[in-house]
Image (cartoon, helix red, strand yellow):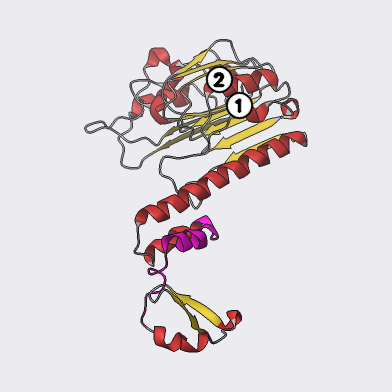
C-alpha cells in the first residue's frame, strides 16, 4: 500500500475519499461546499461570526434548517456572553450600565431579543446610577425591583422592550426617565417627586401619582399626542414649572384622519415659565391652527 503524506491531502465529499493536492485540478466545476456532509458544514459554520454565517445562504443550497440552527446556536452563545458580561460588570461596581440589542447585525432570530433576567442582579446593583436598555426585553417587575434596590439610580432609559406591559416608577432618587417604543406597555404610573426630565413615546396611559416638583423638561411623542387625547391634559398639574416642552406629532394617521393638533381651550394649561417650545409634525398633515395659536398664547416664549 502506497503511503500518502497527510499534509498534502484534501477531502472531496463527491468522491468520498482523500485526494492528493496535485489532483485538485480535476475538481474544477465541482460545487464542493454544497457536497460537504452536514456535520462538517455545521462545524465550519459555527466557526464563523454570525454575520458571515448568515451570508452563506447565498452559497449554500443544502437544508435551510442547517443555517437556521447555526443562527440559533450563535444567538444562544451571544445571550450567554451578555449574561456573563452583565454579571462581571456588576461585580466591578459599575455605575453606568448600557445594553443595546440592535436590529442588525446581531438580531438574526426574528422576534428574538435579549431578555434581561432577574438572576443577573442578585448583587452589585447598589452602585448603579444609570441604566439604559435599548432593544432589550425587560419586565415591569424587574424594573420596579431595580428602582427599589438601586438607591443611587438617577437615570432610566428603556427603548423597544416587547415584554414591558405594566410599570410603576416609584423612586426618590430618579431624575431622568425615558420610555420609548414599548408597544405592549398598557399601564404607566409615575411617582417620582424629584424627576427633572421626562421623555415618553407611547400610548396615552401615563398616570402621575404625585406632583413632580422638579420637572422642568418634558417631551412626548406617539399615540399620546393624537388629537383625541391632547397631551396638555396630562401635564396640566406641572405645566407652569416647565422650561422646555416638546411635542412630536410624528405618528401614522388613520385613514381619513388629518388634524394632528386639536387642543381645546378649556384643557390648555399655563406654561408661565416656558423658555423653549418645540412642535414637530409631518409637512403633509393638516394642523388645527387655532390650537397652535392658543398654545403659543399660553407660553411666554
Residue 27: x and y in percent read 40, 83
Q: Which residues are magenta?
A: 29-50
Q: Residue at x 41, y 14 (%)?
A: 267
**Crowd tier of the residue under label 2, counting other residues whose Cα lies within 10 Å: few below 14, some 14–19, many 20 or above:** some
The quadrant holding residue 294 is: top left
> Does 212 appear above or below 176?
above
Residue situated furthest left in the rendering:
256
Which label belongs to residue 161? Answer: none
Is residue 254 magenta-colored? no
> Does 168 appear above or below 99?
above
Residue 44: x and y in percent read 51, 63
Residue 222 visible within the image: yes
Residue 39: x and y in percent read 46, 59
Q: Quadrant of the C terminus?
A: top right
Residue designated by label 1: 118
Looking at the rendered structure, the secondary structure element under dot 1 is helix
Which of these two is toward me, 271 or 73?
73
Which of these two is toward me, 42 or 50?
42
Residue 270: x and y in percent read 51, 17
Looking at the rendered structure, the secondary structure element under dot 2 is helix
Q: Residue at x 54, y 87 (%)?
A: 2
Amino acid at each position: 500500500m502506497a503511503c500518502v503524506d497527510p499534509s498534502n491531502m484534501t477531502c472531496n465529499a463527491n468522491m468520498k475519499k482523500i485526494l492528493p493536492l496535485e489532483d485538485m485540478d480535476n475538481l474544477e466545476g465541482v460545487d464542493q461546499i454544497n457536497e460537504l456532509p452536514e456535520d462538517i458544514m455545521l462545524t465550519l459554520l459555527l466557526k464563523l461570526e454570525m454575520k458571515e454565517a448568515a451570508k452563506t445562504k447565498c452559497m449554500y443550497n443544502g437544508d435551510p434548517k442547517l443555517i437556521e440552527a447555526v443562527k440559533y446556536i450563535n444567538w444562544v452563545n451571544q445571550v450567554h456572553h451578555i449574561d456573563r458580561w452583565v454579571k462581571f460588570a456588576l461585580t466591578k461596581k459599575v455605575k453606568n450600565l448600557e445594553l443595546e440589542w440592535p436590529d442588525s447585525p446581531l438580531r438574526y432570530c426574528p422576534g428574538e431579543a435579549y431578555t434581561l433576567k432577574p438572576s443577573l442582579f442578585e448583587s452589585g446593583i447598589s452602585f448603579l446610577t444609570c441604566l439604559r436598555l435599548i432593544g432589550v426585553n425587560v419586565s415591569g417587575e424587574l424594573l420596579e425591583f431595580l428602582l427599589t434596590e438601586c438607591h443611587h439610580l438617577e437615570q432610566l432609559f428603556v427603548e423597544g422592550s416587547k415584554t414591558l406591559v405594566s410599570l410603576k416608577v416609584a423612586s426618590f432618587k430618579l431624575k431622568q426617565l425615558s420610555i420609548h417604543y414599548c408597544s405592549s406597555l398598557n399601564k404607566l404610573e409615575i411617582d417620582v417627586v424629584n424627576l427633572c426630565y421626562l421623555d415618553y413615546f407611547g400610548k396615552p396611559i401615563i398616570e402621575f401619582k404625585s406632583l413632580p416638583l422638579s420637572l422642568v423638561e418634558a417631551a412626548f411623542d406617539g399615540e399620546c399626542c393624537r388629537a383625541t387625547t391632547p397631551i396638555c391634559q396630562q401635564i396640566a398639574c406641572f405645566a407652569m414649572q416647565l422650561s422646555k416642552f416638546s411635542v412630536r406629532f410624528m405618528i401614522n394617521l388613520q385613514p381619513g384622519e388629518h388634524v394632528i393638533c386639536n387642543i381645546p381651550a378649556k384643557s390648555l394649561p399655563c406654561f408661565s415659565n416656558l423658555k423653549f417650545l418645540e412642535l414637530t409634525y409631518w409637512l403633509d398633515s393638516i394642523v388645527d391652527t387655532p390650537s397652535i395659536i392658543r398654545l403659543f398664547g399660553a407660553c411666554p416664549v
